[in-house]
Amino acid sequence: MLRARAVAVALTVALLATTDALAQQSTEDLAKASQNPVAAMISVPFQNNTNFDVGPFGRAQDVLNIQPVIPITLSPDWNLISRTIVPLIDQPKPNEDSSIFGLGDISGTLFLSPAHPGAVIWGVGPILTAPSATNAILGTGKWLAGPSAVALVMPGHWVIGALVNNQWSFAGATDRPSVNTGLIQPFINFNLPRGWYLTSSPVITVHWNASSGQQWTVPIGGGIGRIFRIGGQAFNAQVAGYYNIVHPDEAGDWQLRFQLALLFPRR
């Protein structure tokens, strides 16, 4: 009898350990999918970026990016990943100590990506930005287009990669200057137990038509995030801080980023 009870207890402990390991693996898989820009998973991130000490009056600029990601299955071998950014901006005015709030220029990217990639996961496609800003200081007034690409690897608990694009203006308001702008976003994530992870994903931008010394914004920094569930809904929350080691005169030194994403993994 005692031996039977001991065996039952041992089996129960082993089952609980296996269940916990499977749950941890499932959470880490979900974390890696949320950190992969071309994952075949619907997600709706709300990313808020607060840039401090912007403009001549040292005000805060606030940009809330609503960024739905929708994968489309083209064939058993290929996916098309749609990534849209809808910015809501509270922008300090350049000539007075006040700000204006409104919609910025909406951009959309389509990534063609293998459904069954090898060690290197990648996607390529076009990016298009529409002059949707509700005020002149919230956008460029131009239609922009160009190429975009992303590549990443996932060794062990890591997700490491980079996203790049460049856009040129091709239409829009004739009284606004032409635009030639690029973006580089390296990202590195290390996944910890129970859905926690460390992250760094600075957004490096360059405005090629700006004067010398005013072209680049180069931030460094990072933060922490966690995958969690409320009821049956999965979420990804993170907070990070970045310092601009290079930036135009009117840009701020610091940025605080908070993001909450709704995740809809395929079942």
Image (spheres, helix red, strand yellow):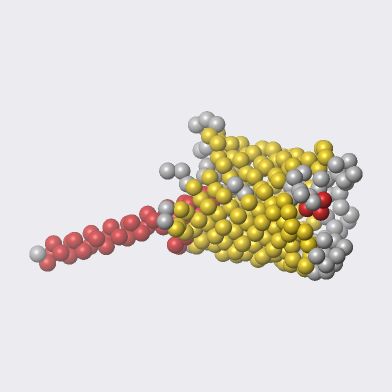
Residue 203 seen in render: no
Residue 44, placed above or below residue 218: above
The one nearer the camera, 44 or 215, is 44
Q: Nearer the viewer, residue 19 or 59?
A: 59
Q: Position of residue 33 (x, y in %)?
A: 52, 49
Which x, y percent locates residue 244? 74, 64
Please indicate, yes or no, whether residue 85 appears anywhere in the rendered image: yes
Query: Viewed as shown, does residue 45 lie left or right of 184?
Result: left
Q: Which percent across, then down, holds residue 193?
A: 45, 62
Tell me if residue 230 comes above or below residue 84 in the rendering: below
Residue 138 locus on image (x, y percent): 78, 53
Image quarter where the N terminus lies is: bottom left
User: Is 34 left or right of 61, judged from the image as shown?
Assistant: left
Position of the C terminus, as image quadrant, is top left
Q: Residue at x 85, y 61 (%)?
A: 94
Left-right relation of 174 to 260: right
Q: Tell me which residue sits at (44%, 62%) in the image.
A: 194
Question: At 66% from the left edge and 56% from the top edge, which residue is drawn?
Answer: 64
* Residue at x 60% of width, y 64% of height: 239
Q: How many marks?
A: 0
Quadrant in which residue 3 is drawn: bottom left
